[in-house]
Structure formats: C-alpha cells, structure tokens
Amino acid sequence: MAVKTKKRGKTVLIILASIAGVIALALCACVAVSFVGIKSNQNFIKSLKAVEYENQLAPHLADDGYYTFVTDDDFKVMQLSDIHIGAGFLSIKKDTMALNAVAAMITAEKPDLVIVTGDIAFPVPFQSGTFNNKNSARLFAELMEQLGIYWAPAFGNHDTESYSYFTREEICNFYTNGDYKHCLLQAGPDDVDGFGNYIVNVKNTLGKITQSFVILDSQSYVGAGIIDGIIYKYDRIHDNQVEWYRNQITALTQKNGGETPKSLVFFHIPLIEFKDAWQEYVDNSCNNTENVKYLYGKVGEKNNGIFCPEENCGLFDAALEIGSTQGFFCGHDHLNNFSLDYKGIRLSYGYTIDYLAYFGIMNYGAQRGCTIIHVAPDGSFSSHLENYYQDKYSPVNEKETVSMESWIPSY
C-alpha cells in the first residue's frame, strides 16, 4: 500500500513538473515573440523619413519654465488620441498599423505641434500580450523622434494601469530623461496631483502670448487596483489641479502685461460638462439651445455613452470665471467625435487611432484619424476632423481595407 502511495505521489509530481515546464516554455515563447515584434516595429520606424518643413518652428524653454514657440503666423496643432500600442506578442500587426497611420497623417499635415490626449499605451495582457507599458511608450517616442516632430502628451487611464509594470511617474521620467528631444512633456509641480500638468505657450515676436496649451492629467480610476479598471469608474481632475490652472493663468496674465492669454486645455477623460451639453442638445431634438451650439461630429458609443467621471471637478466653471480658455479637447471615448459650443466654450472630442482596445474596431474606419487645430495670430482658433482613409494620407505600408459604416461596439 505504501509503495502504491509513493508511486502515485511521484506521478503527481511528474505531472505538475510537466505542466510547470509547459507554462515556462509558453511564457518564454511569448517573450521571444514580443521581442521580435518590438524589433520589427522599431525597424519599421527607422525606415521612415523625417517630415520635411520649409521652416520648422522650434520651441525654447522660457524663463517661466515652459516650452515656448515664437511666431507671428498661424500655428498648427494636430491632436491625436488613443493610439493604443500594445507592444506585446498579440498586438504586433495592429501596432504596425497604428504607427503607420500616425506617421502618414503627420507627414502630410506637417503640424507645428502634436498633442496626444492620452492612451498611447494599451498594456492589457489578454489583448496585447504583455503588462509592459514602457515598450509601448518607447515605440511611440521613437516614432516621433524619427519624424522630427515636437509633441506634448497627456496621460490616459490605460497608459499606466494598476497592473502595468511601470507607474505614471516612471513613464513620465522615461519620456523626460533627455533621450527624446522633441517630447515637451513636463512632470509638473510635486504638490499638484498627477503627472504631466504643464503648459506649452505660443508667443509673437513682440513677446505677447497668443495661445497657451494647457495639458492636464485627468487621472485614471477611483481608488486603486485591478477591479477599478474592470468596472470603469473614472476619477476626475483633482481640486489642486484646478487651483494650479487658476494660478498659472493668473501668472501668465501678469507676464503678458496684464492681458489674459487665450488658452486651450487638453486631457484624456472628458469633463462631466461634455455629457451635460450633449444631453441638452439631444433633449432639444438635436437642435441648438441657448447654451449649446452644435459644430460637428457625433456620439458613436453604445447607448449614447459618454464615459466621464460621476463628480464635477469644477474646471469648466473655473474656465468660465477666468475667461481665458476657449476650448477643451479630450479623447477616451473612441467612437465619440462631436464638437459643441457650451456656454461660450468649445467642448471637442478628437478622432482616435485605436486598432486594438475595442474588439473588432480594426475593421472599421469612420472614427479613425486626427483633429487639426489652427490658431490665428490673434489667438482665435478653429478645429476640424480629418479621417485617415483619405488619398492625401499616403502611408509607407498600404492602408488596410475597412468599413466606413457606423459601428456599434459589442461591449
């Protein structure tokens, strides 16, 4: 009897060891494929040509601590959002598509500045095949350096998930370590919540600020832990960030000879006012109201979804009071792309890039592209959407075939 028991025990150990060996081999295979995929996409990036400008503007670090462009002409901004680079063994092909699309649009548009409103990375393992969010950040930063484009990112909720290898602070340090000369990200003050609360200014040759681009960390989820990423209960811009915004506009006004500078604010997760404004428009049978003026775009998310925090952060009310900010630009909701004037301030979603995060989205193209923002010398601005699947965008790799029909996701 004892002999049989020993044999059974030995058999169980052999089975467990075999299972462990298979798992170890599978993990090694996944790591190897991820490595090969990253190298392949890095080689693709190296094959790209730098964008050719007649006279490219280059910012300098001004005495107020912010990067500043100087021009008496129009200033062109491209907003990109939700690139969703996985950089894992499951997302190699889709990552190439995303990099291909971004490079094609930047090359054709030749913006003075690219502002990315969050979610450069998508380290969700069952879709990307990795927890490593730094590899995604590296691929995008290398792309922008190769193209020679100045860019300013805001953090999104997926850039640094609670289960990702690297924290927000670590990714922020990675972008700002000096390797990426075209990245204008600044961590922001230590006593203000989040990473990447900063400003990029445009001045004329007389030294007047014609536009301030305010970039904010719109945080991620309420609380901490994996469960918050599953139930999608989103955090809001914090009170001390709103106070920082107030103080910065006041300081810039003083430096501007007492003239309040015009500003545009960029972040990832929409303010609750995006939902309020759209609902008021819908409740009025999609006609303008006293508060809401429709400009362009739509809500394409399922059930008219606008995925904003439940709590009002107060930033919109502060902007109304101060009178500097002309518009707010966000991403986050991949199928929403409307722009509304709400109480005199523009609320705009950008087009997104995403080939990865929404199951099946790579097969649809009506939502994929960029937003172009033209800032005039007097500080006024206009914005419009540009779809990727136009002839004027000629990527290195041939564009994928997609449906341009409206798509309702299955989530």
Image (spheres, rainbow, N blue to C red):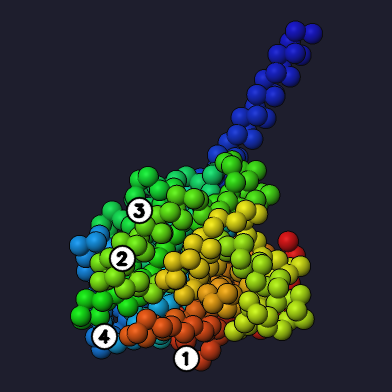
Instruction: Please tell me which of labels 3 and 1 falls first in the chain.
Output: 3
Type of amino acid under label 4? Asp
Distance CA(mark 1)–CA(mark 2): 39 Å
Please name the residue that numbered disc 1 is placed on: 392
Distance CA(mark 4)–CA(mark 3): 28 Å
Distance CA(mark 4)–CA(mark 1): 28 Å
Type of amino acid under label 1? Lys
Please name the residue that numbered disc 2 is placed on: 252
* Relative image position of residue 158 (x, y in whole percent): 54, 55
Residue at the extreme bottom? 391
Q: Residue at x 75, y 13 (%)?
A: 5
Q: Is residue 30 above or below residue 224?
A: below
Q: Secondary structure at mark 4?
A: loop
Nearest to the eye among marks 3 and 1: give it. Answer: 3
Q: Is residue 315 above or below residue 364?
A: above
Q: Is residue 254 left or right of residue 94?
A: left
Nearer to the camera, 385 or 271 = 271
